[in-house]
Amino acid sequence: MSSGPGTRSVARPGSGTERARRTAGALRTGADRRLTAAEARRSAAARRLTGPTRADAAARAALARAAARSTAADGAFDARRAELDALARAAETAAAALGRVRAATDRLTRWHQLAATAEGRRRLAGLAEPAPVTYTPPSGPPRAAEPPPAPRYTPSADGARLTSPDGAAYTVHEVPRDGDAFFHALAEGLARTAPELLARHAIDPGDPRTPRALRRLIAARLTDPADADLLAVVAPDDTDVFTAAEIDATGPAPDLAAGTPGRREFDQLGIVPHAAALDDGARAALATAQLERPGDADDEAGWDHAAADLLPLLAARTFGIDVTVVRGDGTFQTFTSQASTSPASTSQASTPPASTSQASTPPASTPAASASQALAPGRRAGSHRLRGLVDDPEAPAPHVVLFLDHRHYRLAVADPARPLPVPAPPLAPLPAAPLPAAPPTAVGPGAAPPLLPGPVDRPLSEPEATGTPPDRGEPLPVRGTGHGSFAEALLAALGDGNGVLDRRRQVPVTELAGTDVTLTAGQAAHAVLLGGSLSVEDLGLSPLQHLRWLLAGPADVAAAAEVLGIAIEVTAPGRRPHRYGSGPGEPVRLYYDGLRYSTAPQRG
């Protein structure tokens, strides 16, 4: 700056740098503002394009659907045209055959007319009688082979038993007839096959509110985006009655809004007019309202409606299980939690006709059935899209079989698979052990008979000395059930298992599969809450059932004695007794004849 004449102007240090920094900052600020404005314009343009983009996607989807329908129509037209062409050729062939027969018939008739009179015979002038005519029908297309009969379940005469196409036997269990039969049967079936699925949703099968809870849980699937494929087939039946509140809950739909002709028709009849157009949301809302009605609603409105057709499929998808519905005539249909990858896929069952009942099921020809029929491996409830990631892709899904007869659902429970008793191997002859020579002893009145010498010259009834390994003898079987089994004879010798069978012992319920023990729904739920085990007392096992469970692992008497912690002495015909196990006290004595066990006779 200048301070007067003759002085030099001195620039402030750093003034150029500061100006450059300020200029750059201003430029950057302006650029940021322009960028922000451009971003706003881009966002506005993107928003303006959202509608056209969605419309374009919808139009493309509609075009694809129309193209698919056109292709299907073209195929149907070609098939019908080929059929008509074949019929036309057959008609032309038949017409030609008819003309030939008619001409030959006319010639034969005229010859007989002329041959009947003298003038006619003169005119025939010896013409021979024409050969008789024979009509040969044209060969038609070969008849298609009859399709094999569809597999069926075989119900017993009283409806209490079912036999599956592969020979598995089922016992049918009754449930209350209160309009909630499907939900009672489903809850009982889940409690028996997969109680953890009920526990996951905090549902107690013994709670009287369970049907209501299941209704809400299953109805919620209709609004799940993962099940949007079901909305294409959800529609009220012609006779389904709704309340004004249920109609209003749909929005209401434009065709059912107040003052419209459709609403006036509904107000008079209580049913949805045929002309009313309902979108997916409206139809889902009406179906949800139907499913959430109590089973004992007036006029059977709680179960006699269109939405009841989807109950087995919705249950399968809700819990990730397979649900098989068997009708009274043995036809059946299996629903799974997997959506079909092909619109033509159907179940392995005959088509049960849809009915308006608490037991109605969608026919296999409907899209609802097609959407459910890809029989797939096991998965958790609602997790079939994670198969191979967190689920075991090879594990079988829980399976619930429901028997539908006379508009009533019942549960069919598979009989336990009981293994056949293992036959006892025949005893191999053992060489008689030589007895040491002993001087003859006179036995007089009052004199005790001499004891036969044992392996160590001691009475056979005495236990072996402490520290001496027990005489295990040859392996003897312990498997088998029924009269003469090892378990029955051992229990008789133990006297109901006093001192050996602990009623407080915990039993994993999974180990009861294949036995004659069947858990109640309450026991199954209790076991889930306790980690999968219940005590013998809580299970209500009899002493024989308890003993059979303990003996499920041991393969021979020696192993059984070790498991029970007792000593067992087995006597066979013509052999010396063998002691198995090292338990304290007197051994439990049994007799084995090579096929059956029994309690050993008391020694005098």
Image (spheres, rainbow, N blue to C red):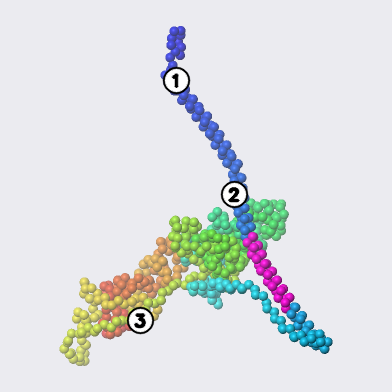
Could you give the CA–CA distance between mark 2 and mark 1, rounded to whole angstroms? 61 Å
x%, y% of residue 343?
Answer: 57, 61
In this rendering, which labeled residue sits more in front, label 3 or label 2? 2
Where does label 1 land, which residue? 15
Residue 188 can be seen, yes or no: no
Instruction: Determine whether the residue tagged by mark 2 lies in a helix, strand or loop.
Output: helix
Q: Earlier in the sequence, mark 1 or mark 3?
A: 1
Mark 1 touching mark 3, by CB under 8 A? Answer: no
Q: Is residue 434 above or below residue 239?
A: below
Going 44% across and 56% down the picture, which residue do you hit? Answer: 390
> What is the C-alpha distance between the residues marked 1 and 3?
116 Å
> Marks 3 and 2: CB-CB under 8 Å?
no
The residue under label 3 is 596
Residue 57 image label:
2
Q: Secondary structure at mark 1?
A: helix
| Residue occupying the point 75% across, 83% down | 108
